[in-house]
Image: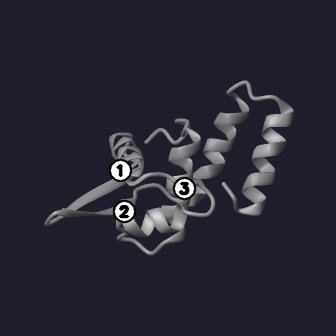
Amino acid sequence: MDTTRRLPDGELAVMQALWDLEPPVTSGELQQQLKESHPMALTTLLTVLTRLADKEFVKIEKEGRSSRYFPLITRESLSAFAAALCDSGLTREELDELRDLLERGTL
């Protein structure tokens, strides 16, 4: 798997929430986890989860009318994302702001 693929902010926030919870995770648990740092409507969250599944970052298991979500990549893969961000043309100021967000755990 090419772990240098870039994730938009919303997708990264959902991955962070998935890593913080014990899988399997429901959409309601994710929405609650994201409430403070990155609130989003349930429909938006479900769209983001579908995109992450399409990129093979998340596994979706249907269980009756509900779904359970599992991260397919580890938090340690973030170092590869960081390297990709550095190569993406972000300014030093943007990279510093991103580092601050990561260190505070708000991203």
Label 1 to label 2: alpha-carbon separation: 7 Å
Helix, strand or loop under label 1? helix
Question: In the picture shown, does residue 38 fall above or below 22?
Answer: above
**If you read the primary sequence from the N terminus, does the residue marked by circle 2 or circle 3 appear first?**
2
Question: In the picture shown, does residue 31 fall above or below 2?
Answer: below
Using the image, tell me which numbered label, if any, was put on residue 27: 2
Label 3 to label 1: alpha-carbon separation: 13 Å
Label 2 to label 3: alpha-carbon separation: 13 Å
Residue found at x 54% / y 61%:
34
Helix, strand or loop under label 3? loop
Residue with the mark numbered 3: 39
Q: Position of residue 7 (x, y in %)?
A: 54, 40
Q: Nearer the viewer, mark 3 or mark 1?
A: 3
Residue with the mark numbered 1: 46
- Pick whichever, 21 or 83, lies toward us: 21
Badge 2: how crowded within 10 Å, few (<14), some, or many (20+)?
A: some
**If you read the primary sequence from the N terminus, does the residue marked by circle 3 or circle 1 appear first?**
3
Q: Amino acid at mark 1?
A: Leu
Residue found at x 86% / y 35%:
93
- The residue most toward the left is 64
